[in-house]
Amino acid sequence: MVNLSRICYRKYGNLVDNLRLYVRGGSGGMGLPRLGGQGGKGGDVWMVSKKEVTLKRIHDKYPHKRFVAGVGANSSVKGLKGEKGGDYELHVPVGITVTNDDGRVMGELNAEGDRVLVAKGGQGGSFHSAFTPSKGQTKHIRLDLKLIADIGLVGFPNAGKSSLLTVISHASPQIANYAFTTLRPEIGKVMYDDHKQISVADLPGLIEGAHLNKGMGHKFLKHVERTKQLLFVVDVCGFQLASKTPFRSAFEAVQLLTKELELYKEDLLSKPALLVVNKMDLPDAEHKLEELREQLENPEEFSHLLPHDMIPRTNLAFRDVVPVSTITGLGLDQLKRRLRGSLDEEAAKALEPLHRERLGALRPSRTPLPVWGI
């Protein structure tokens, strides 16, 4: 059953996060020896970022995944210098890293309109090449989407991330009782009454050793890099199917998640983070929540609960701890408010330098005016 669901979700999941393409620059045009004419240069192949484009759309629209630029025009009596072949521009999503088959990064497309040249066209035939043109570059490249979302859900399998995304957004991720339900990232949009939208990404569940590329490993962690803020999701009882040994508390789950992010890239811990404590409908949940709050306030006192090599060097200071139940609806409205509030706070901070600069420009000059003689 698990294997069947994985196959179906790979095929029909709503997000494709990497593609391998064949690209070829156009060949140059022939030169004209008797008049010294020069053939036109072959066209180039470009990747150009554009909003509202997805890798899945490219995958479905171009099943052959071959992209070839135009051939340069031959030199002729009417046109001694042949015209350049047409460039091929493939529109790709914002947030793409382009690499070759060797893993070398060719460029990144982080904003709409960014361009990366992936295959140059060949030179037209001329005197220097005995009027023989050259072929365009031929390559296999990879488009790797490092997801861009406002909020990234971070948690172990079966912590309730998919259920949470379902009840706060319009997404419909796969939900079941076995580990690794989420095999590909799922994007949901949280809608507000004033038409504000927040994008939330449900990422494949993290497991111990993810920084070493175990489980979904780096495929999970690369997407975390491209989210503005993190939303940790833990089971109030701490139980996780993907753990080597079941956690005895939600505190241990939080600390292990923090350590995995730290081992992969410590900068991730500088992102603003909130904590959701899920499954508050379970027995004794309130007592366990209070215990967790105390542990988070004094993490050093409870570090003995973890193996020494899994104690994070940096303890996250969560902006808020929000208890929820996806079954009863407890805390969901509060969570939506806090997500928006946290994003608005960061947006205001980012604009502060610009506001100060503009205010400074509006202040009257303190340079004394010259006194003219009568």
Image (tube, helix red, strand yellow):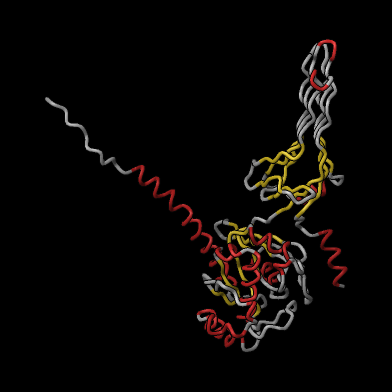
Residue 126 at x, y percent in the picture: 80, 19
Q: Is residue 293 above or below residue 122?
A: below
From the top left corner, tell me how far across and down residue 55 is, in percent.
76, 50
Quarter of the picture holding the N terminus: bottom right
Q: Position of residue 253 (x, y in %)?
A: 64, 78
Query: Which of the two residues, 45 or 173, is positioned nearer the viewer here?
Result: 45
Q: Quadrant of residue 6?
A: bottom right
Quadrant position of the C terminus in the picture = top left
Which residue shows up at 76% across the image and 36% down it?
A: 45
Between 330 and 16, the residue placed more toward the observer is 16
Residue 93 in sight here: yes
Residue visible at 39% across and 50% down in the picture: 356
Q: Is residue 12 above or below residue 59?
A: below
User: Horizontally, is 267 left or right of 72 in the view?
Assistant: left
Q: Is residue 360 above or below residue 311?
A: above
Q: In x, y percent, where is residue 178?
A: 79, 76
Q: Quadrant of residue 35?
A: top right
Image height of 12 relative to 71, above or below: below
The number of numbered badges drawn on the structure is 0
Q: Is residue 328 visible?
A: no
Q: Residue at x 80, y 25 (%)?
A: 72
**Left or right position of 245 against 75:** left
Quarter occupied by residue 187: bottom right
- The answer to which of 321 and 249 lies nearer the viewer is 249
